[in-house]
Structures are given as C-alpha cells and as structure tokens.
Amino acid sequence: MKEIFIGNYGLAQVGQTLTATGWVANIRHHGKLAFIELRDREGLLQVFVSGEIADFTKLEELKKEDVLAVTGQVVQREERFVNKAIKSGQVELRAEKIEVIASSKPLPFELDQHAHTGEDLRQRYRYLDLRREQMTNNLKLRHQVTSAIRDYLNQLDFLEVETPYLTKSTPEGARDFLVPSRVFKNQFYALPQSPQMLKQLLMGAGLERYYQIVRCFRDEDLRGDRQPEFTQVDLELSFASEEEIRALVEAMLKAVVQKTRGLELPQAFPTISYEEAMSRFGSDKPDTRFGLELKSLTDLCRDNDSLLIKKALDSQEELMGICVPDAAAAFSKKQLSHFYQEVKEFGCSRLVSLQLENGQLSGDLASALEAESEAVIERFEARDGDLILLVMAKKRRAQEALGHLRIEVAKALELIDPSLLHFLWVVDWPLLEWNEDQNRYQAMHHPFTQGIFEDGQEPGENPGQLGSRAYDIVLNGYEIGGGSLRIHDRKAQEAMFELLGMSREDYERDFGFFLEALDYGFPPHGGLALGLDRLVMILAGEENIRQVIAFPKNGTGFDPMLESPSLVDPRQVKELHLELKN
Ligand code: ASP
C-alpha cells in the first residue's frame, strides 16, 4: 500500500527517494529527455526521465494508461516551472528506475475531461470513465457526504441498523421489483421501495434513534434524477416533535454543506406551506434561486366582459401568470410557441403574452384587459420592457403549467445562479390526493403519515380537506427528502387504510403484522428520508444522478457494462417454478 498518494506529493517529500505507482496519463518526448504525467486517485505527478537512465528505452513502448512503478528522487521545481494547476505542481520525480507493472490496450475513448463521449460507451467501460478526475471527485464527494452524515448522527446517538432487501410486496406506492422464491413455490419477495414500516417497527422495538444509508428500489419510468435503485439516508426518531426533527435534519444538512463545500449556511431554512408553494411558484418543490413568482388575476377580472375571460372564469378557471423583467423582446415567435406547447401539456388551452411599453400593455388580450390594465401592471409590479405571460385553466393545472414555464424561462434567460444553494421546507401538506384513474383517494406521502383532525372530527368527513404532519425538504427545485410524524395508534392507522379505500380484509392481509405491532406499546415517532443521489448531484453541480453513482443503469434501466437485465439459464427459471413466454 502506498504511504502517500502521488497526486499529493509536495515539498514535504523533497529529497526523498520514493516509488511512485500510477497510470500514465500522458507522455511528452523531448529528444533525450521525456516527461510522464503519472496519475493516481489524488491527481497527477510529473515524472522527469533523463535519456541517461537505462530504462529510458522503455518509454518507446509506453502507452497511455499503462501502470508504472517509478523509483526516483522527489525534487523541488524551479519557481518558473511550478504547475499551479495540479496539487503536486511544486515538485517532480526524477526517474531512476521504471517498471511497467501492467500495460493497457488503446482506450475506447479519451479520458480527457473535455472529450465528449456517448453515455452508453462511458457506462460500458465505467471503470475507465471513473478514472476521469470529475468522476473520481464525484465519488469522493459522495463519500464525504455520507461520512459527514454518519458523523453527525452518530454523535447524536443514532444507531445504524440494516433492514432486509428481500421483503414483502405491499400495495400503495410505486411498482415493486419482485424476486421469485425457489423454496416457496409461486411466491415472491419484493425489493423495498423504502424501509418505511421496518424503521417504524424499530421504533416499536424501542431503539429511539435509527438511521440507515440504504438502497431502495422502485420500478418506475426513469428520468435524469431517477434510477431503479437509489440510495436514501433514512431516519426515524421516537418522542420527537415535528420541529425537532426538522431542526435536526437542517443542522445535519448544514454540516454536510460546511464539510463538503466549505460554506456556512447561517440562516434557518425558510418554511412555506404546500399551498403557498403552489400559488407562488406553481410547484411543491420550488426553485427559489430566482423570482418570476406567479400572480393570479382572477379577482381583478370578475367584471371583465370579454367573451374569452368571462367564459374561462364562469367555468371555474383562473387567469394567472408571471412577469419576466426586461424580456418584452427576449423571445422569438418560435420560442413563445414552444412555451405554448409546453403549457398545453398541462391542460392550458392558450398562452397569452403581453408587453409593457410606455406604461401600456400591448399584445394578446391587451384590449380585453384594458379596463384592468392598471391593476394588472400593479399586481405584477411590471415596468416598461417587461413581458407578462398568462394562462387560463383550473387552478392546479394553471399553477403547474406556470411552475414549469417559470423554470423554462429562467433557464432560457440564464436567470439562475448555479453557485447558490437554496434549501427550504415545504409543510402543511394535504393528507390525501384524489386519484382520477382509480377513483379513490391516495396518500400524498404514504399511508403511515399522521393526519390533522379537528376535535371530534371523524376521519371520513371531508377527507380531501385533511391536513397532515408531513414535510419535504427542497434544494434548488429538487425534492431532496420528505418525512412526517407517523400514526402510532391502531385505530387511526385502520381509519387511514379505510380512507384509502381498503377493506378490513385488505389491510389485515397486507398490513396485519404492522397493525398488530401497534397493540404493544408503540411510541410516538416520526422521521424522514433524504435522496442521497440527488443531494450529491446538486452539491457536485451535476445535472444527472448517473454522474454520482459508480455503476448506474442507463436511461432505459439497462446496465451496458454488465449487460443486465439478461436472459438466464432455463434451469434457473424452472427452479423458480416459472415459465417464460416467447
Ligand atoms: N419512506 C419515505 C419515503 O421513501 C420517507 C419517510 O417518510 O421517512 O419517501
């Protein structure tokens, strides 16, 4: 094992004779002398090779990515030759002996940071891709984040406990990955979507403070910030209030940012309600690094007599929009029609654009809004040169469309400062949301979240209006975690299952073991889970979680290196009592 990584060689090593092992990143030949850039995990070291040493001839055969052991003296570089771009730039190694430990075939792609290589090729040769500095740094950052989290929680007496990966399929939530059992014919394990019930049972077991950095599995359609398997920082505490849990997570995240980015985040994270997030930002995970907040004009237009607006308001639609400063002429017709296509996907039948010039609105609907124009300008605090974009649709649809548009516009105009880290809490979530396809309520978070009931209120009264003790933590427009206070009373848990449309028979079958546990002195408890991949992705300044996962699946859920999923030996299938159809 090497004592010092060669990328960390510095003045302290000057005068010592050392054997540096690493990969050939580059070779420069200058007639009777040569320079090798030798790389290890921590960076590059310049090796000077004089034509006078016996091993000089070995350089003729040397190729990039060969593994070398070079023995020689570390010397200080002259001031003018110091390379500030690398950590070891003040020194170089004067080679006396060069041994080629392993040679490399020509690489399928350049490891140069700037070389552009297709994702699938990079993933096919992931072990090569991970040699790139950026990728190595991402894995280091991930390690620093998990270490900082472990340090923080250990010091608060949390216990790290592992829960099984072969668990039980339960309804609710996303699609499960199933594992057929060989021993139990026709039966399946499920890979956990999260250890939710198990961590709650650990509270029932009296452990009081639990965490786990744990892999979770969801068979969902993939996106840039989703993988079929992903990692959660999963926490659960007994006898803690909602505020205490949030304060703890907040302090933990501040410690992570301090240790990894060297940034102090002195302010408390802002806390806004779900309703406020939707009405101001059109999103339950708002990016607050820029403005462009939503404003509703519905109240201003109650007496408007233009056919279009009247018809919309009569059918309970809302008129709302955003004002983009200095953007009256920023977008071409083509761009605006692209924005229109986007809001259409959210169910808005038109996108209205208005410009403010010389205190007057012009553009679509300007004449229809003539009577309200002053109030509209005031509502948006608009100035000459601003662009106002409006949509009409039912409230949630209009909010979501504008929430999306707000981000598209900010990206197009480069209004987002990528160096900022904006954390915030979203609280006061509804307990349930209506699932149109299944014609029933589903849990907004999950079925174990405590609802908020008025004194004497029956759970079945007005279920759509019920609030909950849930909270999400958001960073730069990504939901990086969520949690809640949990139900710890059997009756309340049964009532929740019933609100979700389950019969006693259903929930006894699927959750009987859990309900039974609530009969044996179950403490009040709550917790949260953070999406580790997303958190690291944002801290690394990356836009895809694959960039911070050592061996990810590609966008279709395939692993191009392992070539998985793959066909298996028919005997294996038979052993599992399965039959494959062609
Ligand atoms: N288990 C939940 C999830 O995966 C998080 C929590 O409520 O702790 O979203």
Image: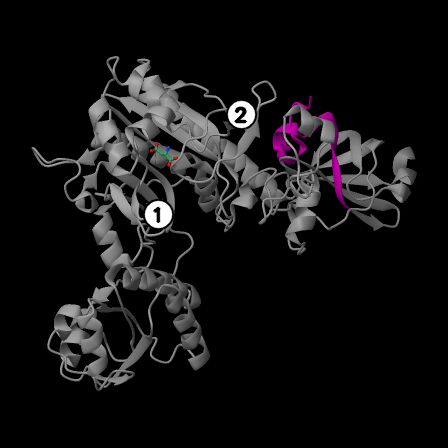
- Provide the secondary structure element on which disc 1 rests: loop
| Residues packed near mark 1 inside 10 Å, few (<14), some (14 to 19) or many (20 plus) | few
Splitting the image into 4 quarters, where does residue 399 fall?
bottom left
For the residues labelled 1 and 2, the Cα–Cα distance comes to 26 Å
Which residue is under mark 2? 187
Indicate the quadrant of ligand 1 in the picture. top left
Location of the N terminus (image quadrant): top right
Per the rendered image, the range of residues in magenta is 1-26
Classify 491 as above or below 253. above
**Callout 2 secondary element:** loop
Picture coordinates of residue 134 (x, y %)? 59, 45
* Residue at 25 percent of width and 52 percent of height: 277
Q: Is residue 169 visible?
A: yes
Q: Nearer the viewer, residue 157 or 174?
A: 174
Total numbered circles: 2
**Can you say whether 316 is above or below 78 in the image?**
below
Residue type at mark 1? Gln
Could you tell me which residue is drawn at 66 percent across and 56 percent down? 116
Q: Residue 23 at x, y = what percent? A: 74, 37
Give yes or no for residue 2 being in the magenta stretch: yes
Q: Nearer the viewer, residue 33 or 490?
A: 490
At 23% from the left and 13% from the top, the residue drawn is 521
**Which is more toward the observer, 339 or 550?**
339
Q: Which residue is mark 1?
A: 438
- Which residue does the image show at 20% across and 35% down from the upper left? 451
The answer to the question of whether label 1 and label 2 lie on touching residues, with beta carbons closer than 8 A, is no
Find residue 350 and name its label.
none
Which image quarter: residue 87?
A: top right
| Residue type (three-letter) at the residue carrying disc 2 | Gln
The crowding category of the residue bearing disc 2, from other C-alpha atoms within 10 Å (few below 14, some 14 to 19, many at least 20), is: few
Q: Please tell me whether residue 76 belongs to the stretch shown in magenta.
A: no
